[in-house]
Image (cartoon, grey):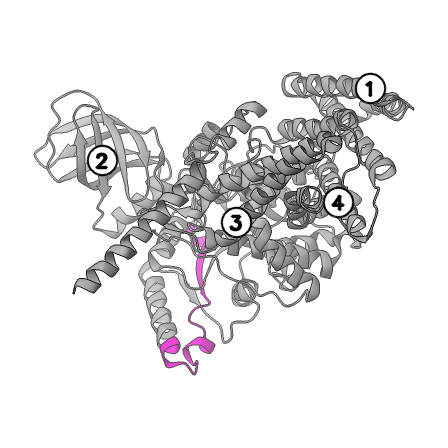
Amino acid sequence: MDNSPHESVSNPVQYVGALLLVSVLLGAILLAPMDAIGQLFASLLVLISISWCSKEAQHTQPHQHFFRILALVLGTALTTRYLLWRGLYTLTYTDIFSLIAVWLLFIAEIYAGITSVLGAIVNAFPLSRPLLTLKDIDTERLPSVDVMIPTYNEDLDILEVTIRAAKILDYPKDKLFIHLLDDGGTDQKINASNETAAATAKKRRSNLQALCEKHDIVYHTRAKNEFAKAGNVNSAIGNTSSDLIVILDADHVPTSDFLDRTVPWMLKNENVFLVQTPHFMANPDPVERNYFSAFTRMPSENDMFYGTIQKGLDYWGSSFFCGSAALMRRAHLELVGGISGESITEDAETALDLHKLGYESVYVDRPMVSGLAPETFDAFIQQRMRWAQGMTQILLLKKPFKAEGLKWYQRVGYMSSIMFWLFPFARIIFLLMPLAYLVFGLQVYHASMLEILAYTIPHVIATYMISTMLFGRTRWPLVSEIYEILQCAFTLKALIKVFIKPREPSFVVTPKGESLDKTFVSPLANVFYWLILILLFAFFTGVYKFITEPLSRELTVVVMLWNGFNLLLLMSVLSVLLERKQVRSQSRLPATNNVVISTQKGQAWVGDLVDLSIGGARMKLKGEGALFSDQAKLTTWCEALNKNVHLPVTVLNYDSKLSLLRVQFSPSTEEEHSEVVAFALADSRRWMSFQRRRTRAITYWYGAKHVLSVGLKPALLHFLHALDIAGKKISHKISSAKE
């Protein structure tokens, strides 16, 4: 197998001459000594060309790569021209404060430009690999596999689901070994000086040992909690011997065909050390749940990375390990001492170490592992801070930009992924820089309205057009801005700590599977309240400046629009900080199976599933006159087990008008419990169907309208919630006084 960066493009050399000619002509046009009006017309011409090329790249198959590259060249040209113009003509200052402000903004813009160009290179040719299978391969040739499930403090119910799914993997049972790696019941923890903590650890060890005995899998623990998850896995690697290793997080449930689709790549090329698959989240994260309430209708945050970026990295031979949902070769891991532990993102670091040795990775874009996203904003931020700190550690400690053994394009791939996590520095500057002019009078952006129209606006439009071309199906417009604003204040502090002490950050397990029994405001909301107040102050100061300084009104309007856009985004994200009541730990996802519901009296009705989770299901029945007792049986085809299953259910309610029946699974035997897991979670085709349903391209204006339509509503909700809490407190005080 050729895993070179030219695998998916047919004869790209044929385009080189044409692209060189275009680049020369483009440079001549954009860098020609024209006035602002001439540059404006040139910009319009380039933007029209980008728009046309983007459409052709989507629809013209024979030469779609040519049009895709051409669009990227045109977009990069506008960005380069803009930065040159900014650096040569606009960086004026009068004192030390304006000097600092001017250069902070320009550095942030350079960062944004560099990340855009790196992203364009990485995602120019997303690699879609064919689906392979073991069906025609002699089982004697198959390697042995160790499935490792590291755990620290996760709930036993979550662990048991993962174990049951691992046991039904479609693979020869004599070559499949499942291991539970307990880091919450180590010798260090059960012998802790704190008696309560020691008792808790002993109880956890005992419970997990019983769980492993119940399911006939191997229990592992170790003496000390060293090097977090990496140390836990490495300890198990030293006590196991299978050819291949699967790593699954405690909440990551594999589909039955996971090994059937990943092992063939190991057989095909002995130089492959990693086969990574997507992390499919079976529940919305706090942004998707609290802000959009559109988990089933729009791409998730994960979809952009796993649906586009990893495929782009795969083309350049730099797709990396993501900690779970992956198959790895033991022999290659042992060459680098197992899972790397110098950073807290041990997954990407391990991939880097093996890529440096010349070994290859494969990314298979098929959702075959479902996991749980953080439920609360606090847990979400903990996870993102760890990712940001870990990738920055790799930058500082491993220096991938000059790492020996990496190809130049692999360095580009790693640097693109790492550079992204430095966004808090730029995002904070973009949020607060309007204050420099509106409040303090610092001339941070010296340009006329015509120059802004000729240089700035085309650069911004081109950036969004290229982003839409690359990520249109997996990331809607302005969604990235929402995520970055939510994270920037917290991850900025975390990044500064890493730059001061690169080895200090420690691994923190992200809480999963939580339920929220009431609606409340996130304790992290205060920082956003302050930011909103600051931007509101800047807005009213700008209004005063507009009235009292008529000579600078043109620039004042531009900066006020910039500040207003930031303010609207900030007020919109307040919705995420209002943690809405959520009893379910897993969302019900769309499903389309044909089902039969039968009662103990021998009555039966047919219907179609509407949605499904491991807890229960909804279905639309056919016919009339359905009457149900509390207990019934659901019969349907289970793709994961390749047979019909008969699942006991408890009827919750029946809507006779809509013919909708809602049931809860009520298994009583071990076989029934496993069948519920297999039916609900172990069919990768259902995950694929769900992803196709929500990954769809939309226009920029529709996406922007969708995001910004939230408007002032979140602020109102926060105000009403605050009034409700205040009312309850006053009422409680009055009641207490009367007593």
Residue 442 circle label: 4
Which of the marked residues, 3 or 1, is nearer the chain's N terminus?
Answer: 1
Q: Residue at x 80, y 29 (%)?
A: 77
Which of the marked residues, 3 or 2, is nearer the chain's N terminus?
Answer: 3
Q: Give the mark count.
A: 4
> Contact, CB < 8 Å: mark 3 with mark 1?
no
* Residue range highlighted in magenta: 173-198
Q: Residue at x 33, y 56 (%)?
A: 157
Mark 3 vs mark 2, foreground winner is 3
Which of the marked residues, 1 or 4, is nearer the chain's N terminus?
Answer: 1
Res 70 quadrant in image: top right
Residue type for callout 3 = Phe
How many residues crowd mark 4 within 10 Å: few (<14), some (14–19), many (20+)? Answer: many
> Contact, CB < 8 Å: mark 3 with mark 4?
no
Secondary structure under badge 3?
Answer: helix
Secondary structure under badge 2?
Answer: strand
Secondary structure under badge 1?
Answer: helix
Which of the marked residues, 3 or 4, is nearer the chain's N terminus?
Answer: 4
Residue 407 drawn at (x, y percent)? 78, 46
Q: Is residue 276 visible?
A: no
Residue type for callout 4 = Leu
Residue type for callout 2 = Arg
Residue 67 drawn at (x, y percent)? 73, 21
Tell me the quadrant of the picture where the C terminus can be found. bottom left
Residue placed under numbered mark 3 in the picture: 528
Residue 249 drawn at (x, y percent)? 47, 54
Tell me the quadrant of the picture where the N terminus can be found. top right
Residue type for callout 1 = Ile
